[in-house]
Image (cartoon, rainbow, N blue to C red):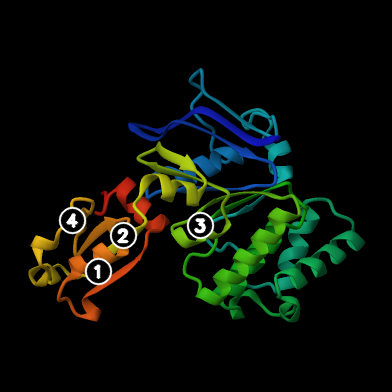
Amino acid sequence: MENVIAAAGVCKTYGSLQAVKSLSFTVPRSSCFGLLGPNGAGKTTMLKMVYAKCLRDQAPPSSLLVFGKDPGTNELDIKYLSGVVPQEDNLDQELNVWQNLMIYSRLYGMSRSSREKRIAELLAFMELGEKRNVKIKELSGGMKRRLIIARALLHEPRLLILDEPTTGLDPQVRHLIWDKLRQLRREGLTILLTTHYMEEAFQICDTVLIMHRGEKLMEGAPQQLIESKLERYVLELRGREALTHMDASRHDAGVRRDDGADTVRYFGNDPGVLRSLAGSLGNGEFHVRETNLEDLFLQTTGNTLDE
């Protein structure tokens, strides 16, 4: 399968700070690839290097190719083939929805008839058709985010790059955007994204790469990573004071304990053993559930803030 992005040993340094350290990965065509990591892990820096907003350090033997082209020497070619959704909302507040898209369509040299048809299609696709004449400052946060995605799709790019596309949005809007991204991927679009929502990465990414302090920690399909790195179930105590009510004698040798700042988790493959470990705890003091990508993320990058 053709790789839209091929990164090998990519580095980026800002003064004494090495934001990206020898990062390697590939993104196949028509797939969704997620970069996960705490704030400051280097995710956004890596995205910017892909669409040539900031260049990597030219230190061999590093290599970064997007559609087989080097962003350092083929910036415009790569940008023409890519659509970008930044973290911040950068719409023109004084214009309406239609006018915002019309300005961008003209920058891509689209004819009047083709751009009007494309804008109408995208507004319908993102369920914004009734808002075409509404000014940006009158839109909700979710509508603005959907409009920015529509703007990124105007020129029918082959690669869609999204930097935390659903941060701050309510669950209904978030699920709507997930549905649209899955549809775009089925239609052949390649997607590269960063997100702090582990459920988002699990729902839409074929592959995730977890990074920390600029380095890759692990990479793979979300479900496969969970199954290979974690036990199947977790007993989550709600507050450390619950520990005083637990029967330590019931601690099973196959159970692993993980301490967070205010949460203690016990991991195991038998939910019955975990419930037995909870002992006399009340229903509101513990929860037994299947492990998920967030558990893996915390285990990999740490339970505490990294300044």
Please give the residue where the numbered disc 1 appears in the rendered image.
275
- Badge nearest the viewer, 3 or 1: 1
Task: Look at the image and tell me whether residue 200 can be seen.
Answer: yes
Q: Count neighbours of disc 1 (C-alpha within 10 A) and say few if under 14, some if 14 to 19, many if 20 or more.
A: some
What separation in Å lies between label 3 and label 2 (alpha carbons)? 23 Å
**CB within 8 Å, label 3 to label 2:** no
The residue pinned by badge 3 equals 202
Residue at left 74%, top 69%?
125
| Circle 3 Cα neighbour tier, 10 Å, few/some/many (<14 / 14–19 / ≥20) | some
In space, the residues marked 3 and 1 are separated at their CA atoms by: 26 Å
Label 4 residue SS: loop
Relative to residue 113, is residue 1 drawn left or right? left
Q: Which residue is mark 2?
A: 270
Residue 33 location in percent, x, y?
57, 47
Q: Which residue carries the number 4 mark?
A: 252
Task: Indicate the position of residue 57 as horizontal and vertical percent values.
Answer: 48, 27
* Residue 257: quarter of image: bottom left
Residue type at the position of mark 3: Phe
The spot of residue 128 in percent (x, y) is 71, 75
Disc 2 packing (10 Å; few <14; some 14–19; many ≥20): some
